[in-house]
Amino acid sequence: MSVNMKCYDTTPCIRCFACMVGCSAENRLRLQRDERIGMEKSVQSKLGHQSHLTPKRRELGVFPDARQVTAFHHCNHCEKAPCLDICPVNAITRRTGGEVVISQDPCIGCSSCVDACPFDVPVVTDGKAYKCHGCYDRIENGLKPSCVNVCPTDAMFSGAKEEVLKEANKRAALYTQTTGKEHVVYGADKVNNYVGTLHWVTIIPKEDLEAYQLDTAPSRPAMQFREVAKSAGVVGAAAIAVGSVGHLIYWLGKRKEKIMQEEQKNV
Amino acid sequence: MSKKITVYSNMERWFHSHLVHFVAFMFISGLPVLSHKFDFIAYGAGIPMAALTGNGDILSAGMSLMRFIHYSSAFLLTMMAIPFSVMMLRKFTKLSMWPDKWGVKATIDGFKEMWKFYINQEHVRFGKMNAGQKFFAQGVVIFMIVLTVSGYMLIFRDAFSVETAALARGAHAIAFIFLSFLLMIHVYLATHPTNKNSYSAMFKTGKMDEEFIKDHHGIYYDKLKKEEKIKEDTD
Amino acid sequence: MGKTTRREFLKGGVATAAGTALGIPNTAEAKTVTSADFALEKKVSVLCRMCAQKCPAVATVLEGRVARLEPNMGTPYGAVCGRAAGAMGALYDPDRITTPLIRTGRRGEGIFRKATWSEALDMVAYKLKKIREEGDAKSVAYLPRFSAAGGVDKGFFHLYGTPNIVGYGDTCFGSSLPVGYGAVMGGTKLSAVSGPGTSAVSTDHEFAKYGVLIQRNVGGALVCHPWGKTFGLGKKNGMEIVVVDPRKPSEAGESLVDWAPIKPGTDEAFLLGLLNEILTNKYYDEKHLRSKTNADMLIHPDTGLPVKTQAIMKKGKELEDYLIATASGIGFKSEEQGETKLLGAYSVSLDDGSSIQCKTALQTMVDANKKYTATWAAEVSTLEEAQIKKIAKKLNDAKPACFIERGYRSERYANSLREKLLITQINAILGVYGKKGGVIQNGKVKLGKAIKVPKVKEPNIAKWMAKYDENKPLINVKFYRRAWVEAVLTQKPYKQRVGFFWGQNIIGGSTGSTEIAKALQRLEMMVCVSPHWNETVMYADVVLPDATFMERDECLNGKWKSPLATLGVNRKAVEPLGESKDGYWILNELARRILTPEEHEEYFGEYEKRGMITFWEKQYAGIHGITAKEQASLPSLQEVLDGRVWAGEKHYKIKCKTKTGKWEIYPTALVKKYRALKDTGNKGAEYINPLPLFVGPFVLKGNKELANNEFLPITGFHPLGTFTGQQTKNNLLLKSILEEHHADHVFINRAKGESLGLKDGDKVEIFNPRLPKIVSVAKVKLSETVQQNTLFAYYGVTAGALDNYSAHLRNQERGGFNPNHLTEFLFSPLTAGNPVQDCTVKIRRIS
C-alpha cells in the first residue's frame, strides 16, 4: 500500500463544515460498529473527543479590513510523530498507509502524547486518548477518508502521496498566478526536525500561515529538553558508573600502597 | 572501647531507610514511562497483570501497574515527607547541608579537601558533611521539590494548560535524571569501604565512634564540643 | 521503527507466547477493519431534506440505523453540506414527535396528550368531512413545506375541493424575485405572478471570472447541490468575488474576495450607482445590446412605450417588433441588419403625420439614472465610491463570464422588487445570461402526474387579492401564506376555518409572528404534520408525526436548482421511528375517511393495493421536457428506484419570454403596469417605476438618523442552520460548531458596541421601537466584520422571542433573536412580499 496523504485547500473551501460534521458522524458509526453504541444513543451527546477535525475561528484585522479565519485543527500524521515515539505503551502505531493511529485498548490515558504533540491534537477523555486516525479503516478498504468523502467542493482531497502532492503543487502554482500572492503547500516540505514532513498538507497563501495557525516551527521545548536529558542521562550514568569503578580500583590500589608504605615505615 | 556519639536520630534513620524503598519503587515504576529502553520492566509486570485483569495488552497492563505503584509510592512518600520536612524546616538554618563557611573560595577549598581525602587519601578535617555531601543534599532537596511539584501537576493536569503540563512532564524527567546521577554517586560513596562507619551509623546504630568523628569530621567534632554535646575526657 | 520492531519482537517472543497461552489477544495495534465490516453497510438513495433542496445523497444503513449520509455522485454536481452529514441528529432527535398529539391546553400553550392514530385521524377527518359536506371546502387551507407526501398531497387537497394550497415562498423567493426577473426576461404576466422563481436559473460559478455576491451568500446558504459545489469549484478556478453585505461571511472564502460592507437596506442605491458607472463608461458590448436586448427600442416620450410596434412571426411565435434608428433612418428592428443607434433621440413621424423626438430605451435609462452617480450611491450605502467604481470596472473586464448574484430568501424590504429588477437589468446589459461563466437556464425533468385530479374552479385567496386588493396586484398566486393570514383575520374574500400545516412553520418563518399567532387562534381547527417542534406546532389542535426523509419512500423528483436536468428519488432507509408514519400513509388514511368511497377507490385504490409503484410508474411514463439525446440516456424506472441519479447535459442558454423576444433591459411590461397603477392613484406605483430611480425601503424613508442604540437588523444563514431550523436545532452533531461560532449571539460592530459600553457575552434586550412590548434577549458578540449600523443574527439558530416551544427541546436554549418575531405584520407594496428586515431595532443592556 502506498503512503497516503490528505490535502486541505483553503481556496475552494466554502466553510460549510461538512468535513467536521462528517467526521464526528463517522466516528459514531464506528462506535456503533465496534463498541455497540447505537447511533440513536450516540447522537444524544456531543462526544467532543470523537470530533477529530474541529474549527478554530478567530477574527483578524479591523473593520472594514477584517476577516474571520477558520483554522482547521487536526492531526497532521507527522513523518516523525512525537506522539508515537513517546507513547509508553506503544498504543500509537503507524499504519502501512502512513496514518498515525491511537489504539484505545492499550492506551492508559497517561497524556504523554498530549504533551508531546506540538499541534495540541490528542485529547484524553475518560482515561483514553483520541485523535484523528486518518480513517485508516476506510482507506484500507479503498474508500476516501470521511472528511474528504463529504467535502462538496474538492477543498479536501486525498490519495497516494505523490499524486496529492502533484495536484497540490499544481493548485498552489495556479493560485499564485491568479491571486498574485505566493501560495505554499504547508507540510509538503520538512516543517522542522521535530515533526518532519506532514501527511496532511494545506494549500495556503504564504502570508496567511499564521492567520490559519499553521505553525512553521512546531515544538514542545520541554519535551525536546526531556529527550536531550534522556540522552545525557545515558552518557551521565555511564560516566558515573565508569568513574565509580575507576575510583574504587584506584582507591584500593592507593590504599594498598599507603598501607605498604606504613608497614615499611614501621619496619 | 571508645565512646559512641549519636549522629543520626531515629527519625532520620527511619525516614532514610523507608525513603530508600519508596525511591526504589518510584525509580523502577517511573523508568518505563521515561524511556522505551525500560519497557522490559513493564512487560515483566504486565504478564501476570494481564492474566489477572484480563487486560489484553501486556505492556499496557504492566504500565498500569507501574503507574499504580508510582502513584501510591508518591502518595506514601509525600505523607512521610511531611513530618520529616516539618522537622527539618524547624532547624532549617542549622542543617548540615549549609556550608560551614560561605563563599567561592571556601567551596573550592571544600572540594580540595575532598580531593585530598578521596584521591590522595590524606587526613582531612570535614564537618558533619563534606562539600560534596552538602551539594548532594542541596541537589536532592531541589530535585525532590521539582519532582514533587511537577508530579502532582501531572496528576492534576486538567487544572493546567497543555503547555504547562508538558513543561511539568519535561521538568519531571529532567529532575529525575539529575537526581539519578546524584543518587548513583551517593550510593557508591555510601557503600565505599572508607565510609563503613557512616554506613552502619545510618543503617544500624545511628551512632559513630567519637574517635572516628574526631579523626574524620574534625570540624563537626569541634562543633559538637562547643555545643557541649561531647564532654572532653577529663582524665 | 526501531521501537516498533523491538515491540514486535517482544510481543512475538515473550508476550504473545504467554498471552496466547493465557488466551489473551494482543491489541496494541488499532483494529484492522476489513471489507466484511463495510459489506454490512446497506446503501439507500435519498434526497436530503435537512433543508428543502433535496441534494441527492446516499444513506448508509448499519444494523437498522442510518449511520452516514454522503453525496450521491451520480450527478456531476453531487454534493452535500454539513447539515446533511448531521442528518442522524435530526432523525434520532430524542425530542422528536413520534406519537399523534391532541391539544389539552390553550392554543399556543403547547400542552398536549398522546393519542392513537385512529383517534387523531378521525378527529381531523370528521371536521374536514363536515366542512366539505357543507360545501365550504375553500375555507380549508393546506400549507405545505417540504411535505412528506410530495406529488400527491396537493392533488388530494384539490380533490377535497379547496383552491387554497398556500406556499411559503412569499417570504423567500416567491414575491419580488419572479417580478424583478420576469420584467426583463418575461415569463410573468405581472399579475397573479407565478413566473420564474429561484429555480429558474443558476450561476455558472465554475467558469465565472468575477462575481458580485449580494443579498445572498452562496457558500453559507443552502443549495449545496449544485450551487455550493459550483461556487467552490469557481473559487478553485480563480473566480474573484466581491461580497456586498453588511456582514462579511466567512463562507465566501478568504482569498480572491473583497468585502463591501454596505449599510443594510441600501442595496438598491448601490445597484443604481453600479448601473450608472456601467452606463456612463459604456461598460457594455454594443453588439450584444443590439442583438439580444431592447436597448435600441425607440420610446414614446409620453407613454414610455415603444413608439410603434408591429406583430411579426418568428420561429412560430408571434412577437412584437419595434422601431429603431440607424444611420440611414428609422425602421423596424426585424427589418434592419445594420448598426442600430443605442443612444440619442431621433425624430419619428407618426401615423397622423406629425413627428416626435424619441429617445432610445438605453438613452431613456441613461437620462433617468444620471443623478444616481457612484458618489451618490457611496453616500447612501456608506461604501467607498472607489469600490463601487472598481466593481463596475471588474464586471466590465470579466463580462460575460461574470454575474451579480440574484438573491434568494432575499424578501426583506419594501423595495426588494427594485433590487431584483436592477440585478436582472445589469446582468442583461453585461450580457451574462446564457453565457459560460454567467447565468444560465436550469434544466428539469418534467414528470407525469402521480395523481390527476379535477381542477378547483373557485379562485384562491391570492387570485382574488390580485384582482381586488389594490395593495397586492402583483401577489404570487401560489406562494401567499401571509396574505392567507390576512384573509383569516379579515375574513376576506371568504372565511378560513381550518389550517392544515404540513411542515410549514408560519410563525417562526414569516414577518409579523405575533399577528400571525393571533390569526391562528381564530381558526376552527389547526392541524400540524411535523416530526419536529416549532412555534406553529404549539398552536395545533392535532399534531400528526410524519416520518423524516430517511424513513419514507417518495414520488420521483425531476426539479432541482441545477443547470442539468436531473432525475432521482428518495427511498426509505429505515422504518419510521416510534409511531410516526410516512406521508402517503397519512394522506391515504385521511382520504379514506374524508372522500367518498368511490373517490377514494378511484384515486387511492391502486396505491392501497400496489403501494408507491403506482405513483412512480405514472410519473416515469409521463417524462418529457428533455432533449431526445438526454431521453435516450435516461435510466429505467427500476434503476432510478435502485438509487441511480440521472443528470442530463449542461446547456448554455436562457429562456426569454418577453413580447419582443428581447431581454427587456427597458422593461415595457412594467411600463404598462406602472401607468395603470398611476392612473388609479395607487400609492405603491413607484415601486414598479420602470426607470432606474431610487425608491428605497420603508426604514430609510425620511432619512431619519438612527438613535445611538438603534440598529438595522439583518440575518444570514449559518452553513449549519436551516430556515426556521427544525432539523438543525436540537441537533448535537451540529451544535459544537454552532457554539464555536457564537451562532446564537447577535453580532454588532466592535467599535460601535464598545461605544455603547458593551462587551462580548453581554446580554441585551432587543426590541422594535414600533412594537416595544415584544422583547428578545440575546448575547452580544462584538465583531470587526459587521457594518456599524447593523445588528446581525444567524437565521433559524435561536428560539427567538416566542420561544416557549424550546421547552420541548432539551438541546435548545431559550431566547435569541429571530426578526420575524419582532416585526409588524406588514406587506411589501404590490408584491405582498415579506419586509422582514424593513425596521429598526433598539437594544438595551441587561445589567
Image (cartoon, rainbow, N blue to C red):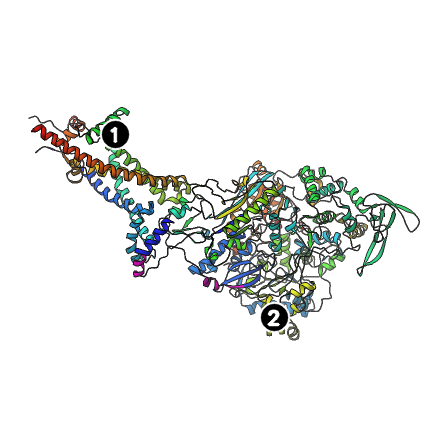
C219 or A39, which is in the foreground?
C219
Tell me the quarter of the picture where residue C21 sits: bottom left
Question: Is residue A204 found inside the magenta-colored segment of the image?
Answer: no
Query: Is residue C342 visible from the viewing direction of this image?
Result: yes
Q: Amino acid at mark 1?
A: Trp
Q: What span is in magenta?
A: C14-43
Q: Which of the image's four quarters has the N terminus of chain B?
A: top left
Kindly report the distance in space between the C-alpha atoms of the residues bearing marks 1 and 2. 96 Å
Question: Is residue C27 found inside the magenta-colored segment of the image?
Answer: yes
Residue B64 x %, y %: 32, 51
Residue A25 x %, y %: 49, 56
Q: Pointer 1 indicates a residue of which chain?
A: B
10 Å crowding of disc 1: few (<14), some (14-19), many (20+): some
C784 or C829, which is in the foreground?
C784
Residue on which disc 1 sits: B98
Give the SS element for disc 2: helix
**Which label is found at residue C613?**
2
Q: Amino acid at mark 2?
A: Ile
Q: Are marks 1 and 2 in contact (CB under 8 Å)?
A: no
Query: Is residue B7 visible from the viewing direction of this image?
Result: no
Tell me the quarter of the picture where residue A249 sits: top left
Residue A165 x %, y %: 52, 48
Residue C821 versus residue A249 in the image, above or below: below
10 Å crowding of disc 2: few (<14), some (14-19), many (20+): some
Give the SS element for disc 1: loop
**Quick check: C246 left or right of B45?**
right
